[in-house]
Image (cartoon, coloured by chain):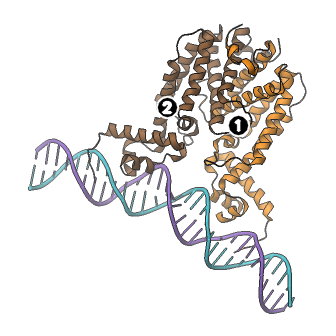
Chain colours: A orange, B brown, C cyan, D purple
Amino acid sequence: MARRNDHSAAELKQLALAAARTIASEEGLRGVTVRRVAERIGYAPGTIYNLFANLDDLIVQVNGETLRGLGAALAQVGGGDPSTRARRMTDAYFDYVELAPRLWAMLFDHRLPDGVGLPDWYRQELDRLIGDAARRLGPALGDRSPADARRAVVAIWASLHGIATLSVSKKLGLVADVPARELGHFIVASIVSGAATDGRLNSSDIVQSYSKI
Amino acid sequence: MARRNDHSAAELKQLALAAARTIASEEGLRGVTVRRVAERIGYAPGTIYNLFANLDDLIVQVNGETLRGLGAALAQVGGGDPSTRARRMTDAYFDYVELAPRLWAMLFDHRLPDGVGLPDWYRQELDRLIGDAARRLGPALGDRSPADARRAVVAIWASLHGIATLSVSKKLGLVADVPARELGHFIVASIVSGAATDGRLNSSDIVQSYSKI
DNA sequence: ATCCGTTTTGAACATCGTTCAATATATGTT
DNA sequence: AACATATATTGAACGATGTTCAAAACGGAT
């Protein structure tokens, strides 16, 4: 068998990605297997390996789209004074997570085997997302250097990731009856308002920031 | 074959747990398979199922020990004024993560299948850990209600989890050149100092906390 | 010495990712 | 129109996974 010509290679790739995305949305990373993706698009398992290097490659590409979607959702937040924009971006983050929690979870559930790094385009995608957020949140973060502003954004990025991850994997309800979104707002507010109160929370002397007043 | 009597059932269970812990420390969750654990203790795969309900059960029990160890490490932090204690507990957290990063990562990498919840003893273990931390951090968190103090601790718990997770899975270096520990201090400091500055960051009006001054 | 009850085994099953020789078809050439 | 070439597609095969369970082997009691 060969050369069915139903679809071009590029079309096939998109079909496979869409199928994987659907499965991931419904069942999470576990459900995404080569055979199931292949079956869903009406091809044999081997065909997947004409389109992707392996299953990891396929998943990373789905994750790339998810990441781009998150970036777009955050970029869509406009206007408002700096602090309400921070709030709206936090909301946009959780909106996006809740849109397809298992698909979002795959962003972090998936781990490449030892020694294999994420592809360069993925790193750039992620870098741009953080950079964009840093630029948009800059005004809310007080008068920090660009480096310190970015550091604050990375802290927010990691914190929201932690909250959403625990929430999606049902490990947040074990320790709190507070909705994930509310915790997210609390942390972002802490960082943002920390910037508003005074200049203590810059990178050069975090230690001192522990001592009250 | 049967009744080798080399070990009691309880001993065997500990042997299996220790073997799994070693493998997890070296290779992470992926390396922990029934056959490898069995081989390492010199028994057949089927024997594992005399000791544990299934592989998930075994892993949850290893995770329970890891969690208990983290709790002990945090509880060991004593003395000092409230804010230096907060700092030391944050250090203790990252010390513990760095002691065996892949073992720690298994705490969150592992997911029970759909519909299966964590056992009650695990929930209690976790609840005690958070409760302890809330009690110890209380003085550093200003004059909040116990409920709000606990919420702040949960926020810290989730944030540190996010940072450490991204760090261990090498996804933090993609967006920042800051060590995970430093980011952790930054966040804890933000929350702690947020409590120190004034009373705005309580649960009842997080929204308002976004507006500067 | 015999029996019983329990522990331990390992073959078996369904699934997984991955490889690759075989094949069937579209395309290019005559 | 017939043939040749190239390649897209297949599916069997391999090793590994979690899990089950009948069979077997052994310790202890009678």
Left or right of D30 in this view: B83? right
Q: Is residue B70 visible?
A: yes
Q: What element carries label 1?
A: loop
- Residue A23 percent across, percent down from the top left: 67, 50
Q: Based on the displayed image, in which of its 4 quarters is residue A195 positioned?
A: top right
CA distance for labels 2 and 1: 25 Å
Residue named by callout 1: B173
Q: Based on the displayed image, in which of its 4 quarters is residue A153 positioned?
A: top right
Q: Which amino acid does label 1 sit on?
A: Gly
* Residue farthest right in this picture: A79
Please state which of residues D27 and A153 is positioned toward the viewer in this rendering: A153
Residue named by callout 2: B66
Mark 2 and mark 1 lie on one chain; the one further toward the N terminus is 2
- Residue B203 percent across, percent down from the top left: 70, 15
Please state which of residues C27 and A170 is positioned toward the viewer in this rendering: C27
Q: Is mark 2 on a helix, strand or loop?
A: helix
Q: In which quarter of the image is the N terminus of chain A?
A: bottom right
Left or right of A146 in this view: B194? left
- Residue A2 percent across, percent down from the top left: 72, 73
